[in-house]
Amino acid sequence: MTIEHFDVVVVGAGISGIGAGRHLQAHCPDCSYVILEGRAQIGGTWDLFRYPGIRSDSDMYTLGYSFKPWTEAKAIADGPSILKYLHETATENGIYSHIRFGHHVKAASWDSATARWTVEATRGGEAVRVTCNFLFMCSGYYDYARGYTPDFEGMARFRGTIVHPQLWPQDLDYAGKRVVVIGSGATAVTLVPAMARTAAHVTMLQRSPTYVISRPAEDAFANRLRRWLPAMLAYRIIRWRNVTLQQWIFRLARSRPAQVRKKLLDLVRAELGPGYDVGTHFTPRYKPWEQRLCLVPDADLFAAIRSGSASVVTDRIDTFTEGGILLESGNALEADIIVTATGLELQFLSGMDTSVDGQKVDFSKTLGYKGMMFSGVPNLASSFGYTNASWTLKADLTCEYVCRLLNHMRATGTAIATPVLDDPDVVPERWVDFSSGYFERALHKFPKQGSKLPWKVYQNYAKDILLFKYRSVDDGTMVFAKAGARAAELA
Ligand SMILES: Cc1cc2nc3c(=O)[nH]c(=O)nc-3n(C[C@H](O)[C@H](O)[C@H](O)COP(=O)(O)OP(=O)(O)OC[C@H]3O[C@@H](n4cnc5c(N)ncnc54)[C@H](O)[C@@H]3O)c2cc1C
């Protein structure tokens, strides 16, 4: 059997993988590449999630690519519009012909002697093998097969329907039904007003509240600017305004949490009126931006609560019953449908079995280099976006860096690039500085970041532009070698 070889194998055809294809074509035009995608469609997250109201919770001027302006009226866009944007990007750039659908990557092994990765995938039960010089993981950050559902007492007893938003049955009829949505994150906050339009009633059942903020779905300034200026110029201006504003709010939240907390809660009070118990239902235990801030476009959640079609209950589940949920307070919620908007099952590099020169790589023992390559692991990068800003901002920068790295290797005749940790002052830290439950559950499987550059992840787009686009790739930490130099000897 002949094994196909590519300069670059990209795993995944979501926002990151499609972006990787476009960047490789633009900046490394002589590079051969293939995108191995496990599913039958592009889009990743934006194709998988099909629950009512699915939308972005960050603006499309920053969730869009640096090279393709977002031109629709809504800045907070629905899932189908985002998917359309991705299809357009793939079509305009001829990326579809590089994608192999239905190829689920299971393992990758690096061989220093040949300076190649062997990537093993399955296609409908059949094993497929390709080799490459560089492996670019754009596989997202969670398990596609299942979402996270806690083991609630008595679930099997419930006579109605239980649904997880990640596996939404397209024929689910909730018109006139009593719905309980368990959760308080972005998904719950999206689902509740969307389902409340036709359901008999929707209850958002949360153990503890999340910070929420309402913003108009349409950005009036952006839409005006787009009428006056060429699309790309308007896009760049709006993008930078949004990046700056977002960073300013994030820094303010971290430096003056009490002030930001008061402002956020005042805004909720203004929406729900003086009689509403904001203290119980919208006042989190943590400080603002220790977890992602939840966006409520056009105040839709508040409107649903005001109209009585939705309500919030803050309590703990004692047990599911035949007819709904019994709470620890002794109260009961009657339900026909229970939606477990309880989160994602995080997964690092899709759980791929990875080895370097015959040694299995335990990524939790590695240190992330710029948050995208890993100490002691040659020629492998992964796309992991910002936690405090749009994913694509960092995905774009990561792709640009990978292209610079590939071009540098080509220019210097080197075949291997390995981040090597040889600074004893670098102290390992958590991969992300966030307290969200889904991170807490999974962080032990993720690499660490370091206490200083280039191992530190600042979650700061402006800083990263300098780091990814302008700092020399040959920075003393990235060690370059010819084929044959064993990774273990470099470290
Ligand atoms: C419901 C939801 C809403 C979100 N909203 C926002 C938002 O508003 N703003 C924001 O910045 N971020 C948001 N995110 C985070 C979001 O995941 C990123 O914005 C972005 O879509 C990630 O793109 P990606 O291409 O890196 O990963 P994904 O979208 O996860 O795509 C990964 C792709 O890789 C494929 N793949 C995975 N493993 C393998 C394998 N082993 N072999 C082959 N193929 C594989 C998958 O099938 C998929 O197509 C949201 C996430 C969710 C779940």
Image (spheres, rainbow, N blue to C red):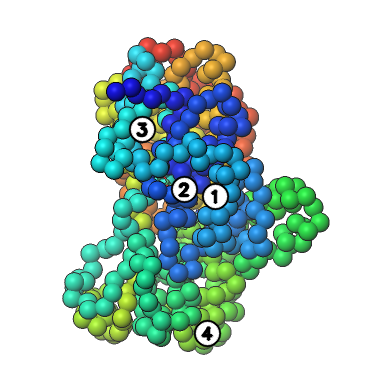
Q: Nearest to the eye among marks 2 and 4: give it.
A: 2
Q: Is residue 354 above or below residue 477?
A: below
Question: CA–CA distance between discs 4 and 1?
Answer: 38 Å
Question: CA–CA distance between discs 2 and 1?
Answer: 8 Å
Left or right position of 215 against 348: right
Q: How crowded is mark 1: few (under 14 residues within 10 Å), some or many (20 or more)?
A: some
Question: CA–CA distance between discs 3 and 2?
Answer: 30 Å
Q: Which of marks 4 and 1 is nearer the N terminus?
A: 1
Counting from the top left corner in percent of width and height, residue 87 is at 54, 49
Question: CA–CA distance between discs 2 and 4?
Answer: 39 Å
Q: In this view, does 1 lie above or below 451?
A: above
Counting from the top left corner in percent of width and height, residue 74 is at 63, 63
Q: Which of marks 1 and 3 is nearer the N terminus?
A: 1
Counting from the top left corner in percent of width and height, residue 177 is at 36, 83
Residue to which mark 2 is pinned: 42
Question: CA–CA distance between discs 1 and 3?
Answer: 35 Å
Q: Which of marks 3 and 2 is nearer the N terminus?
A: 2
Q: How crowded is mark 4: few (under 14 residues within 10 Å), some or many (20 or more)?
A: some
Q: Quadrant of residue 367?
A: top left
Residue to which mark 4 is pinned: 306
Q: What element carries label 2?
A: loop
Cβ–Cβ under 8 Å for marks 2 and 4: no
Q: Which of marks 2 and 4 is nearer the N terminus?
A: 2
Cβ–Cβ under 8 Å for marks 2 and 1: yes
Look at label 3 and name its amino acid: Thr
Q: Earlier in the sequence, mark 2 or mark 1?
A: 2
Counting from the top left corner in percent of width and height, residue 418 is at 43, 23
Residue to which mark 1 is pinned: 87
Q: Is residue 367 above or below residue 251?
A: above
Q: In which quarter of the image is residue 178?
A: bottom left
Can residue 185 be seen here?
no
Look at label 4 and name its amino acid: Arg
